[in-house]
Image: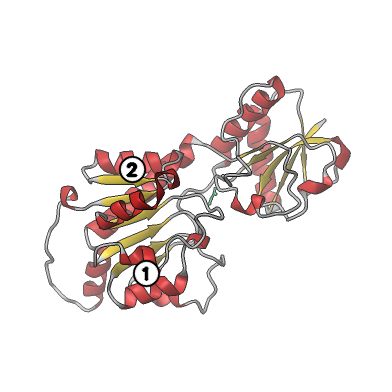
Amino acid sequence: MSILLLGKLSEAEYAVWQQHLSLHLPADETLVLASQAYDKTAVDIALVANPPAGALATLPKLRFVQSLWAGVDRLLSDPSLPENVPLARLVDPAMTRAMTECALANVFYLHRQLPAYLRQQAHRQWQPRQQVLAAQRRVGVLGMGKLGAAVAQALADVGFPVMGWSRQQGSDGLTALLSRTDILINLLPLTAHTTGILNAALFEKLPVGAALINLARGGHLVEPDLLAALEQQHISHAVLDVFNEEPLPERHPFWTHPQITVFPHVAAATDPATAARVAAENIVAFRAGRAIGGLVSHAQGY
Ligand code: GLV
């Protein structure tokens, strides 16, 4: 049987993955690339990075799917995804570290008022603003999975009062968190329950002047509601790494909005050097009948 690497990858990216996977996969495993000819009936494991919809349904012997992305919302939204085949999302400590660095960078960016100082510099304005210490800046983290929990801990370690929320805590818990949040970070998985959660009703529950950092998925955000909340100055600034449509269309209003910072989905990219090891370990565990890390529940959606 063979392991198929399948994704929206360039030839060069396939080669990099192949190189790293060959370092970590047991010698008796056969790796085939979707960019080359291969026998579909011989594939029992698929390693996927943004595969075309329907592709996994064409593998009759498929028994395990390892995502090379942390978020599996796109995979799960493919109606032809075989439901009885175990699917694992990528849980890579290096990616968790990258996400933590990104969250720290953006919390400090907002906390130290960089958007305002950058605007002032553009107008040659020498104008000190009120200094606030981390202990006075409350951070709320939505999503207490591997990424959210690590981010919350790192922020607490540098002195911010941090609250975390996961959907199991219910809407009362969310309301309580929002009322005490100056900077809100979204790290929820995108599911049927969390789609559009960053909307007008949620923004209203934040104190006036709060800021938003969305590092999860564009589908969490109701874009017109954010624009309205910024317009009303209820939200002071938004840092957005993810969008409903990626790349963000050239004419999209977010690009030039003075209260929005746009990043091109770079918060925590998969690094083949570390992810290949995680994927290989999961494959070995699967073959041995041991527990797989990051196993996804189709019912929960993550
Ligand atoms: C990136 O967005 C990922 O899901 O890995």
Q: Is residue 45 above or below residue 245?
A: above
Q: Is residue 84 above or below residue 239?
A: above
Residue 267: image x %, image y %? 45, 52
Q: Secondary structure at mark 2?
A: helix
Residue 64 or residue 36, whichever sits in front:
64
Residue 148: image x %, image y %? 40, 44
Would you say the residues marked 2 and 1 are in contact, meaning their CB atoms lie under 8 Å apart? no
Residue ID at (67%, 49%): 12
From the image, which quarter does the C terminus lie in? top right
Of labels 2 and 1, the one closer to you:
2
Residue 285: image x %, image y %? 65, 24
Q: Is residue 69 above or below residue 74?
A: above
* Residue 238 appears anywhere in the view: no
**Disc ID at residue 19:** none
222 sits left or right of 294 in the view: left
224 sits left or right of 31 in the view: left
Q: Secondary structure at mark 1?
A: strand
Residue ID at (17%, 47%): 135
**Residue corresponding to mark 2:** 152
Q: Residues within 10 Å of mark 2 (few under 14, many from 20)?
A: many
295 sits left or right of 165 in the view: right
Residue ID at (59%, 31%): 277
From the image, which quarter does the N terminus lie in? top right
The answer to which image quadrant residue 144 occupies is top left
**Labels in figure, total:** 2
Specify the amino acid type for callout 1. Answer: Ile
The residues bearing labels 2 and 1 have C-alpha atoms spaced at a distance of 23 Å
**Residue corresponding to mark 1:** 260
Task: Tell which circle, 2 or 1, labels the residue nearer the N-terminal end.
Answer: 2
